[in-house]
Amino acid sequence: MIFDVIFRNIHLLLSGLGVTFQIFILAWIGSFLLGIGLGVLRLSSRKAIYWPVTIYIQTMRSIPLILVIFGFYLLLPIITGKSMPSLVSAVISFIVFEAVYFAEIVRGGIQSVRKNLIDAGYSTGLSYFQVMTFIILPQAIKNMIPSIVTQSVVVFQDTALAYVIGVKEFLRITTLVNVREVRSIELYLFAALVYFCICSFGSLLARRMEKRYGG
Amino acid sequence: MLNYTFDWSVIWRHPYGGWLLEGILITIQLSILAWGIALFLGVIIASLRNLPQKWVKAVAAAYVETFRNIPLLVQLFFWYFAAPELLPYSARQWLYQNIEPTTLSYYTAIISLSLFTSSRIAEHARSGFSSIPKGQYLAAFSTGLNTLQVYRYVIIPYTIRVFIPPLTTEFVTIFKNSALAMTLGVTETTFMSQRIDSYTFHGLEATIGAMVIYLLISLSVSGLMGFVERFLYIPGLIRKR
Amino acid sequence: MSKNNTIIEIKGLNHWYGNFHVLKEINLETRRSSCVVICGPSGSGKSTLLRCINGLEVFKEGDVIINGKSVSQCFHNHKELYKLRSKFGMVFQHFELYPHMRVLDNITLAPRRVLCLSKNEAEKSAMALLEKVGILEQAYKYPANLSGGQQQRVAIARALAMNPDILLFDEPTSALDPEMIRDVLKVMADLAKEGMTMLVVTHEMGFANAVADEIVFMEEGNIIEHDDAVTFFKCPKSNRAVEFVDRILVHI
């Protein structure tokens, strides 16, 4: 094995990694925000809100991400009437798909706050808004953080799927370099190692937090 | 809005309907085979992590970390494109001459899916074991049961119940993950839907059709496992979902 | 004569958890059919002592003699150890019923698997025991569907099912609501009256006063005081016991 193929193409590989991070950050922010909204809405007692949100969440959880990516890639040009950069299409797919998983975490986090604690807040005369801000959310967020970090690692891993619609992210660049250099062992090992380092850092972080916050 | 007329018949029209059916069959085969192997490997790995020998524990932990922290797609590519290169020249020659490329990609997909899923199952099995209160062992031993009986009648039945719900989730997940096998040219459901796209330019309908197929598979798998869970249901142990 | 009447004899028992010395040179003799209450602040080694007596804890020094039989001898022979444990019944703070078995199966597991009773025999005597502890109607339910007090009475029935020579209670009422404590204590008092040998770790001083023959007071792994119940409550010898009894009685 001669790893000089990595050094020769490092600028290319790094640019791919840059695109991967770009997708990750956009997808993360978008899906997290959408996820909070969906999570809170799913706790609504109004049927007209609860059911559509629940159906949306359950549907997304049942289908493969790769199909969602293909779906938007085919759908967006039809809706907008012009061709869309595949990166935009991929990011939209990630947001729509991953938000559902964040929503479940948010819902679980809010539900994990003990009912008595909420009643204790009301009993001292706090309003709904105050109970939400000072009692429920701080507790809920504390409970949610390890799961959020774990899910973020999943989102990062999933960004590799942008490959299938030709986004020039890390994995696609790796295969492109391989086409030119034909050094598959070194290149795919390198790609695996890079993903491994980033993801195990995230997993480690999640485990630390779980210990600190008592799971 | 671009001028686009939907043609839903690409889902059932000859030959496309047949393609999708074939795809479904392969999706199911692939998933069940990989799930079986993953369950077997995962339970072994989890048991290894419970052994007292430090180095065995470390190896098992490294296994879990490796296969969990690398995207499945990267693992697929590694086993398909890179791993054969590690073989000696003659072995590689034999492999490429005697095994059809489609068979090769099919088995590569099974191996990758099993390894990836086994690491996740190992984690669930481990937390299943550690969720048993120490008092259960004490109570069982205090009545004079021997070690084998304690495990057979108390600890293992308990573990299975705790272990089943995450196992259900993994089973649903493996059907979704099997879609990635399309990138190696395995002719499963997702692959077929995109093949229909390239033949008819009505990929959106085919894609939505494939989504519905996965939705139905998920629903049936959850239903089936729900039945198993009800069969094993014990108040207070498995939370109703 | 007193020797014949001794059922448990603890001689120079020492035990450590790592560097922590949990039990320090414990000596204790218990007569057949007596009810001994072991009390003391938490972390004083009471529960560990109970677990050493039925060999759940492999103690490091000293010995426990049950009916003339050495527990430490059993540590090298697992068959003997299992046989020894089957002579004890043990009741835990958190019940430790097997959640995947119905009440009846919880009780019959050991009689069927250790004593090799038939299913019918085991269930018949289990039903009799359930009647005795006053929850016959719960036989076919799962533990999670029972109240804490009911669960603890099932646990007592499970312990009795092996026809034990000795019952060990490890804080049996600490996890219960007050109104349920009474039911459980009632069952325990009845057992004591019938002449069951009982070692009870508890903070229920009312129970100790009314039922116990002897009181053992422990602190930091030592037995500070060992008296008959009347003496212990009327005029305890050690200051620590006085303080402890005062605090607990005030608390009640």
Image (spheres, helix red, strand yellow):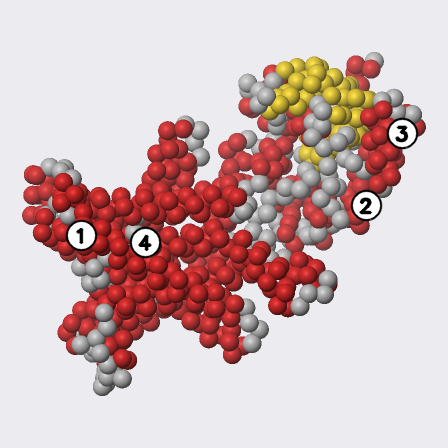
Q: Is residue A31 above or below residue C8?
A: below
- Residue type at numbered disc 3: Phe
- Residue type at numbered disc 2: Arg
Circles 3 and 4 in contact, beta carbons < 8 Å: no
Read off the residue under disc 1.
A12
The chain ID associated with circle 1 is A
Circle 2: element type: helix
Q: Residue at x 67, y 42 (%)?
A: C95
The chain ID associated with circle 2 is C
Q: Is residue B171 left or right of residue B240?
A: left
Q: Is residue A20 left or right of residue C45?
A: left
Q: CA distance from mark 4 to mark 2?
A: 58 Å
- Residue type at numbered disc 4: Gln
Q: Nearer the viewer, residue C78 or A214?
A: A214
Same chain for labels 2 and 1? Say yes or no.
Answer: no
Q: CA distance from mark 3 to mark 1?
A: 85 Å
Same chain for labels 3 and 2? Say yes or no.
Answer: yes
Instruction: Tell which tag, 3 or 1, sits nearer the viewer.
Output: 1
Read off the residue under disc 2.
C182
Q: Residue at x 14, y 74 (%)?
A: B199
Numbered badge on residue C32: none
Q: Residue at x 29, y 73 (%)?
A: B208
Read off the residue under disc 3.
C233
Numbered badge on residue A157: 4
